[in-house]
């Protein structure tokens, strides 16, 4: 599995949200760090194939995703910023609903949902209504929906906003575990979110990739 961004630019009218981003990623976690307005969410939306680059290309295992969006969609998991759950559903009902929307078969979805709820420590709460869940628990349901198709590329956008410290740590541990056999892109403006989990970081500023660093290097930057 390999994700390549080649001179990716995105403009909205006169606004340049991304300017010539070039990056090559393999399995593991990469932290995408930058202040608000840096272009992180725009980049996430391009990777989620919700939008297309104005210039440049994004390649998944060699295929240009502007021409072959399904190649990436099939292997993509996405946890958007401020992901909402339906308060009147149980986690099982909610995940079955998302699985149906994604076109997964009912039978394999059921099995996968049980697996995910166990893995994410939600098994005991699987029959409670989501409206009564804490922020951290809801976020674990959010990560569960992103994992329904066992994605090779997992994109999580500002996942720890509003979580208490204990849930933050728990969430980071989950991401570390998930990164053993997939590419995980973790977008955040909070340095402590990634310092313990991301072996590489990409630092963005005003639509540009200003630094890409390996672990030993990056603590000196931030
Ligand atoms: P971040 O996620 O790092 O906060 P964004 O990707 O949301 O940054 O935004 C990058 C820049 O692009 C900002 O200046 C933002 O106002 C602008 N932008 C993002 N999306 C749009 C859009 N749909 N239309 C116009 N400008 C946008
Ligand atoms: P493949 O099966 O060869 O990987 P896809 O199934 O990903 O290709 O896409 C088939 C065709 O449908 C593509 O060539 C593309 O032009 C078009 N297509 C599908 N979704 C989109 C989209 N969101 N934007 C633009 N073109 C799309």
Image: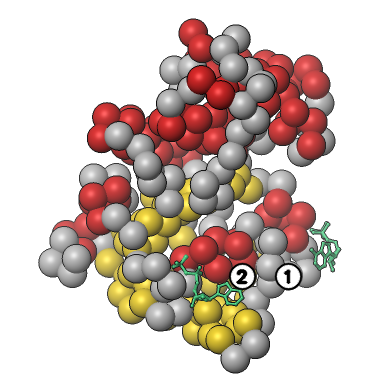
Answer yes or no: disc 1 within 8 Å of ligand 2: yes
Q: Which residue is mark 1?
A: 66
Q: Is residue 149 left or right of residue 20?
A: right
Tell me the crowding category of disc 1: few under 14, some 14 to 19, or many 20 or more residues within 10 angstroms, Cα based.
some
Answer yes or no: disc 2 within 8 Å of ligand 2: no
Residue 39 vertical placement versus 50 (above, below): below
What is the quadrant of the C terminus in the image? Answer: bottom left
The answer to whether residue 96 shows anywhere in this view is yes
Residue 205 percent across, percent down from the top left: 36, 77
Residue visible at 55% across and 68% down? 42
The answer to whether residue 152 shows anywhere in this view is no
Q: Secondary structure at mark 2?
A: strand
* Tags 1 and 2 touching, CB below 8 Å: yes
Residue 153 percent across, percent down from the top left: 56, 49
Q: Is residue 156 left or right of residue 188?
A: right
* Snapshot quadrant of residue 13: bottom right
Q: Ligand 2 quadrant?
A: bottom right
Residue 100 percent across, percent down from the top left: 79, 31
Residue 127 is tagged as: none
Q: Which residue is mark 2?
A: 58
Residue visible at 27% across and 29% down? 166
Instruction: Name the N-terminal-most of marks 1 and 2.
Output: 2
Mark 1 → mark 2, Cα distance in angstroms: 7 Å
Which color scheme did the rendering employ for the protein? Answer: secondary structure
Q: Secondary structure at mark 1?
A: loop
């Amino acid at each position: 599995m390999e994700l390549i961004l080649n001179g990716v630019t995105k403009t909205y009218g006169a606004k340049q949200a991304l300017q010539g981003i070039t990056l090559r990623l393999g399995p593991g976690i990469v932290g995408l760090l930058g202040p608000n307005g840096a272009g992180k969410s725009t980049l996430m939306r391009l990777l989620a194939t919700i939008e297309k680059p104005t210039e440049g290309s994004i390649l998944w295992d060699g295929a240009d995703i502007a021409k072959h969006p399904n190649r990436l969609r099939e292997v993509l998991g996405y946890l958007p910023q401020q992901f909402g759950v339906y308060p009147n559903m149980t986690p099982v009902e909610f995940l079955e609903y998302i699985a149906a929307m994604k076109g997964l078969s009912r039978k394999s979805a059921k099995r996968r949902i049980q697996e995910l709820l166990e893995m994410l420590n939600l098994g005991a709460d699987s029959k409670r209504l989501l409206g009564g869940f804490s922020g951290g628990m809801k976020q674990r349901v959010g990560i569960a929906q992103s994992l329904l198709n066992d994605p090779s590329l997992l994109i999580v956008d500002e996942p720890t906003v509003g979580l208490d410290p204990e849930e933050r740590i728990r969430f980071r541990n989950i991401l570390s575990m998930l990164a053993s056999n997939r590419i995980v892109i973790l977008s955040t403006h909070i340095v402590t979110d990634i310092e313990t989990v991301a072996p590489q970081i990409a630092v963005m500023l005003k639509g540009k990739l200003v630094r890409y660093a390996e672990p030993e290097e990056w603590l000196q930057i931030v």
